[in-house]
Image (cartoon, grey):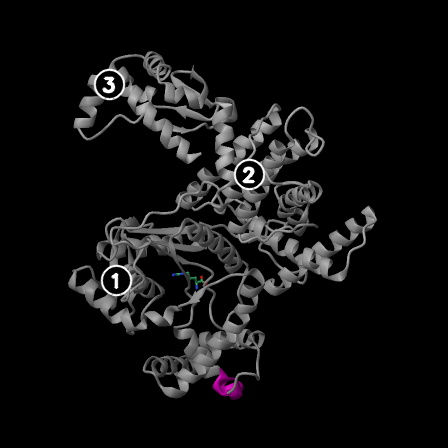
């Protein structure tokens, strides 16, 4: 109901002006106009909107907040345009004003939502140069020659959902897979492979990623224990950095092996990403160091070039450094991230031309990002209004609260995890079909169990407040009860069932009427969709969209169970069908923005 919020705000500003002409004039001239603070009501008992401003004006106006509220209400009650929209305006508590919308107003909103494929969500405005504002979402970002782990899965699912929301809003979204494809580890791996499996460096098919991961582990062991190996590995990195043909070929081969493996997961999860790994920024690392040096930000500390932070100190109270270039001349993870920030904010074609950059990684990287962000700001690589945001998330734990492991104690492979979700969802489905005496063919079973299994994994992740650690439980995420994907999908299936039975679902031209409280609460919830989307866009918390969709499904189920829909008597049936249709549209769009496809039957 954001458009209504604007309309009511307009009326409210007028009322405020009439109630307190001098004070509003003075405030306006001072460039700080009085803000009545109209917001969506925090609880349904408070109506639809609430005005919180009266409490703030008390000092200025030398009146009690309740007196101020009474003056405002008085003026609002004289405004016919305003009165057309509202049912009641009431003063509450110390001086809040609660507003409930009139039924005509709510029904008009329903009408317009039914004819709006965006369900009230506005399109973003173009920026001054006439372009759609750009947002870089840096997510997933696994490391080459290593297995993608559950942390990367979380990043992938959360980053994808945020990207979908931005895209729906109309932003130019650049989905970046910042893969770890550069650094000493390649020197190590290539040196080791030359010794033990040279064919792996020459041709593609002789080994798979599992082998590479094992080779990587062995290489790391040798690197840590064998001085000679360490030396050779360093030389190998230098060769690679200098663009030695053979080294590059080996490196590319390793990358493409991993890429193929990652892609299997992305395909199954329906994730789009542009791979632009750390290696891409090599070409800019020198410039980064030079610019920092020219700005006088670089300090040489024990041979390493550092920038000392102004905002974070270590345990000893001394400023912490961000190491830009190591004593041996090598660059760090942070250096690459600085080059990336610089590139992402720079205008197209020299960069991405973004105004907002979002990083989705585990919270363990929080201090890395806050350090890098500070350096980027001080280097003036962040344009005016530019935003840098780390979207941290907690660990994925098993049901025992410990790190997620397989029964035999190994780290869980993502592929196996998805397979298991689908397998379990298939078992649940077959059991349910059995108990309901239903017969379905193989295609149906495969489609439903795959959709539900993947949906359950995604939704379980998204519905948690991402900051907290998250306990992975197949039983919970696949349950038909509670805040789960199957519960939401099932609400939609119920509506599809109704539409199949309702012969004439053409509701576009009818006028609606409601009489039951279940209808009104469902309608009010439906009309909040746009607010939720804008809130997630700002706060980067997809769990708020999940909570909304869950509460919507609960209200719908209550309505479905308690109010006759197809056998409605006394009121035009189309009103209830309209609620069903808008619920279905909202669930479908909302789930779509979470990256979850829906089902007609399940
Ligand atoms: N490759 C890193 C990891 O696996 C994540 C990279 C995140 N993005 C970034 N720009 N640093 O932890």
First-in-chain label (1 vs 2): 1
Seen from the viewer's position, the closer of residues 299 and 203 is: 203
Q: Nearer the viewer, mark 1 or mark 2?
A: 2
Q: In which image quadrant can residue 340 be found?
A: bottom left
Query: Does the segment drawn in magenta span residue 194?
Result: yes
Residue annotated with mark 2: 508
Which residues, given as a range, are shown in magenta? 193-202
Task: Give the Cα distance between marks 1 and 2.
Answer: 65 Å
**Left or right: 590 in relation to 7:** right
Q: Nearer the viewer, mark 3 or mark 1?
A: 3
Could you tell me if residue 306 is visible in this image?
Answer: yes
Question: Dots 2 and 3: beta carbons under 8 Å?
Answer: no
Seen from the viewer's position, the closer of residues 144 and 45 is: 45
In the rendering, at what x and y percent does residue 470 appear? Answer: 55, 48
Could you tell me if residue 409 is visible in this image?
Answer: no
Residue annotated with mark 3: 60
Residue annotated with mark 1: 306
Mark 1 is surrounded, within 10 Å at the Cα level, by few (under 14), some (14 to 19) or many (20 or more) other residues, namely many
Query: Does the segment drawn in magenta span residue 349?
Result: no
Q: In which image quadrant can residue 191 be found?
A: bottom left
First-in-chain label (3 vs 1): 3
């Amino acid at each position: 109901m954001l458009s209504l919020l604007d309309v009511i705000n307009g009326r409210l500003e007028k009322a405020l002006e009439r109630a307190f002409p001098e004070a509003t004039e003075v405030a306006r001239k001072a460039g700080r106009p009085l803000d009545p603070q109209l917001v969506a009501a925090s609880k349904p008992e408070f109506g639809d909107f609430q005005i919180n401003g009266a409490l703030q004006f008390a000092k200025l106006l030398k009146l009690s907040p309740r007196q101020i509220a009474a003056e405002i209400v008085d003026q609002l009650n004289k405004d016919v345009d305003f009165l057309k929209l509202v049912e009641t305006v009431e003063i509450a508590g110390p001086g809040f004003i609660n507003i409930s919308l009139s039924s005509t107003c709510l029904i008009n909103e329903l009408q317009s939502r039914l004819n709006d494929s965006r369900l009230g969500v506005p399109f973003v405005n173009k920026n001054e140069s006439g372009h759609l504002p750009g947002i870089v979402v840096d997510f997933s970002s696994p490391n080459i020659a290593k297995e993608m782990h559950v942390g990367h899965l979380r990043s992938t699912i959360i980053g994808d959902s945020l990207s979908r929301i931005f895209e729906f809003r109309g932003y130019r979204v650049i989905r970046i897979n910042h893969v770890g494809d550069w650094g000493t580890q390649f020197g190590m791996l290539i040196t080791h492979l030359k010794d033990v499996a040279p064919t792996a460096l020459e041709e593609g098919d002789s080994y798979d990623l599992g082998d590479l991961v094992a080779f990587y582990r062995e290489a790391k062991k040798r690197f840590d224990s064998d001085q000679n190996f360490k030396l050779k590995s360093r030389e190998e990195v230098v060769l690679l950095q200098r663009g030695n043909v053979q080294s590059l070929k080996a490196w590319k081969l390793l990358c493409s092996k991993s890429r193929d493996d990652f892609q299997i997961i992305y395909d199954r999860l329906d994730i789009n990403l542009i791979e632009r790994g750390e290696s891409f920024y090599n070409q800019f690392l020198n410039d980064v160091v030079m610019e920092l040096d020219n700005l006088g930000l670089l300090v040489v500390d024990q041979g390493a070039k550092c920038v000392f932070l102004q905002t974070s100190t270590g345990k000893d109270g001394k400023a912490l450094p961000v190491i830009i270039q190591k004593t041996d001349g090598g660059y760090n993870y942070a250096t690459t991230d600085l080059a990336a920030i610089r590139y992402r904010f720079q205008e197209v074609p020299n960069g991405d031309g973004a105004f907002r950059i979002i990083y989705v990684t585990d919270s363990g990287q929080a201090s890395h990002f806050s350090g890098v962000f500070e350096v980027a700001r001080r280097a003036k690589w962040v344009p005016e209004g530019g935003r840098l945001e780390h979207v941290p998330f907690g660990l994925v734990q098993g049901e025992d609260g410990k790190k997620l492991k397989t029964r035999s104690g190994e780290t869980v492979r993502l592929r196996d995890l998805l397979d298991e979700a689908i397998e379990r969802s298939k078992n649940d489905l077959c059991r349910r079909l059995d108990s309901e005496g239903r017969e379905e063919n193989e295609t149906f079973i495969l489609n439903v169990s795959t959709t539900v299994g993947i949906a359950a994994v995604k939704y379980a992740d998204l519905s948690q407040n991402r900051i907290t650690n998250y306990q992975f439980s197949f039983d919970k995420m696949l349950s038909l009860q509670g805040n789960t994907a199957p519960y939401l999908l099932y609400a939609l299936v119920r509506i599809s069932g109704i539409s199949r039975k309702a012969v004439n679902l053409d509701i576009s031209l009818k006028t609606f009427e409601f009489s039951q409280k279940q209808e009104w609460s469902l309608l009010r919830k439906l009309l909040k969709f746009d607010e939720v989307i804008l809130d997630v866009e700002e706060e980067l918390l997809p769990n708020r969209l999940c909570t909304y969709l869950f509460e919507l499904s609960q209200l719908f189920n209550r309505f479905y169970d308690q109010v006759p829909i197809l056998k409605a008597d006394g009121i035009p049936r189309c009103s209830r069908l309209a609620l069903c249709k808008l619920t279905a549209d909202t669930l479908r769009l909302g789930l779509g923005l979470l990256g979850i496809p829906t089902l007609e039957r399940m």
